[in-house]
Image: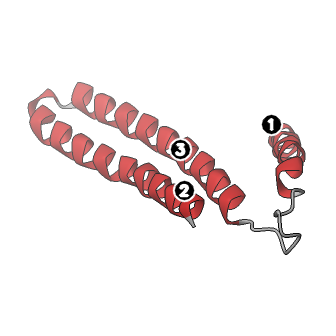
């Protein structure tokens, strides 16, 4: 499994290399802020999805084990999901800022 993940990572880096090879119109040094922001957005979105899935799975398991604490577990779940989603939203804002400048 580890070998497959390493090969997947190497393949993704190889696929992204043409994006990093482009130069600016003035022929100056290339600006890596935008590609880095896009890569960060992809990583943040993936990690948000993993975190939300684990949080939801844990909350539903906790609700099944202790039905009396459903309200408290639901509140903690919603608060946790909001905080997890904020990572993706902050990264999206950073992507727009990098694109504007």
**Image position of 85 (left or right of 39):** left
> Residue tagged by mark 2?
95
**Residue 78 lies in quadrant:** top left
Query: Residue 87, how many percent across, how many down?
Result: 43, 55
Depth-wise, is mark 1 or mark 2 nearer the camera?
2
Q: Earlier in the sequence, mark 1 or mark 2?
A: 1
Q: Which residue occupies 10% across, 36% down?
A: 71
Query: Residue 83, how many percent across, how many down?
Result: 32, 53
> Residue tagged by mark 1?
1
Q: CA distance from mark 1 to mark 2?
A: 32 Å
Q: CA distance from mark 2 to mark 3?
A: 12 Å
Identify which residue, 16 or 80, lies in the foreground: 16
Identify which residue, 41 or 22, lies in the foreground: 22
Depth-wise, is mark 3 or mark 1 nearer the camera?
3
Number of residue marks: 3
> Residue tagged by mark 3?
45
Identify which residue, 92 or 66, lies in the foreground: 92
Q: Which residue occupies 44% across, 34% down?
A: 53
**Image position of 29 (left or right of 101):** right
Q: Quadrant of the C terminus?
A: bottom right
């Amino acid at each position: 499994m580890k070998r497959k993940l390493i090969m997947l990572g190497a393949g993704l880096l190889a696929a992204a290399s043409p994006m990093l090879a482009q130069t600016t119109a003035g022929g100056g040094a290339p600006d890596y802020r935008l590609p880095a922001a896009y890569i960060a957005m992809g990583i943040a979105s993936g990690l948000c999805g993993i975190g939300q899935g684990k949080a939801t799975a844990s909350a539903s398991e906790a609700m099944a084990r202790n039905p009396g604490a459903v309200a408290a577990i639901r509140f903690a779940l919603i608060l946790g999901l909001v905080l997890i989603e904020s990572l993706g939203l902050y990264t999206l804002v950073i992507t727009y800022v990098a694109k504007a400048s």
